[in-house]
Amino acid sequence: MVKKQLALCIGLAFGCTMAIAGDDLGIRKYDINEFDPMLLEQVREISRNANAARAEVSGQDDMSWVSEMAEKAIVQAGDENAQQNDSGLASPDGSDREKKHPLGDGNRTLIFVSWSMGATALKDILLSFDGLPGVGMVFRGIPDGMSMGDAVAKMHLLTQETQSTVSVLLDPLAFQRHSVSAVPTVALEAPNDALIAKVAGSSSVSYIERTVKEGKRGDLGTMGSTQEIIEPDLMEVAKQRIAELDTDAMKKRAIARFWDNHKGHPLPPVTESATRLLDASVIVPDDILDSQGRVVQKAGRINPLDMMPFDQKLVVIDPTQPWQVALAKREYADHGENLTVTVMATQIPTSSGWDLFNSVQDSLDAPLYLLPPDMAERFQILRAPSVVTADTKNFIVREVAQSAFEEANHEHQ
């Protein structure tokens, strides 16, 4: 058994084959359960079809916002401790590690803001609470017409200019949880995200802390002037954009681009028929030992064909040449009972793409695969078409010229 597996490994058997802006910024992921299940299924469907087509979709204009949302859903700036506490990763044992809030354990103070308040007011808040633990300044979304990257950079600039350690969060869910509709609003939040108390019209926490000590809870009303929130809810924007996606068109574009990224291994044509023998032997540089230290294969030259027969017929063609497709069809039909035939294409031009691929498969009534470069090297396949078989000691590489194929066909008729 060990020798059989060694032979397989030696090469007889073959198969067909955003970054976050700024080091000071961290990520706090959305809870996936917050999204509508139907919308999530649409996103999963997009991903499944893209993967099935092996397409690169990151360059699409209509998908750029999805990439940004995936990587920068909630942004925090400043506090290194907040970055360390932000974890949505799986633990080494495979279980989900408990997600921690970027503001740490315990009660937290959220100061809800908007760019409608002006940069000066926002900087004053950052300076006022610098050094206080568990305090975060929270935005609901990004202004209309601004990219996610620009919004992140703009928020990051606030902490750079003030050198404040207060975390800046992009968290529309917090606005929804506590029904925040105007800014500034200060809210005290429990570790389980439950509201302790909130007050609108002020960014000061002294009043709300004093009122909570007096036993009051919940919405404490408005104690000053407020501003409108000019940023649309990021979650609602995401849901709307997902709902508007033309998934059928995206799948078609992904499939159409497949052959741009899978060039195969083009080979020159055969000009004169020839047959070559290829020594199947390989060199084992060191003794191969089992778990008990016993030698299962001594170092030296070995021939895998001594251990296992090569029950394959590998037919390599250029599918753009109809006569080579006809040759592959003939070789596929003439395989006998003991050989498995695999037809491999040296290339599929982008201009022909799936039309050519599917037409060749239909003609063969068999699967078609792309020739991997390492397989071409292992069997020394230098030209197309080539047919690879083996005897008891050697691989046999047979190159067929068009004239020889046509002559044989004429005689057969």
Image (tube, helix red, strand yellow):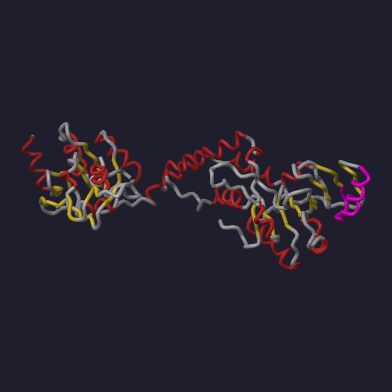
Residue 105 in the figure: left or right of residue 306: right
- Left or right: 83 with respect to 132? left
**Residue 254 found in image quarter:** top left
The residue under the point 79% across, 53% down is 113
Whole-percent x and y of residue 15? 30, 43
Q: Please, is residue 245 above or below residue 141 in the view?
A: above
Between residue 348 and residue 193, name the one nearer to us. Answer: 193
Q: Is residue 309 magenta?
A: no
Q: Is residue 222 above or below residue 155?
A: above
Residue 76 picture location, percent across and down: 69, 56
Q: List the single residue furthest toward the right.
A: 214
Quarter of the rendering occupied by the N terminus:
top left
Residue 217 visible in the snapshot: yes
Count of numbered circles on the image: 0
In the image, 213 versus 175, the foreground residue is 213
Q: Quadrant of the C terminus?
A: top left
Q: Which segment is the magenta one? A: 199-215
Residue 206 highlighted magenta (yes or no): yes
Residue 88 is situated, as x and y percent measured from the top left of the image, at 61, 47
**Outermost residue to the left:** 411
219 relative to 295 in the view: left or right: right
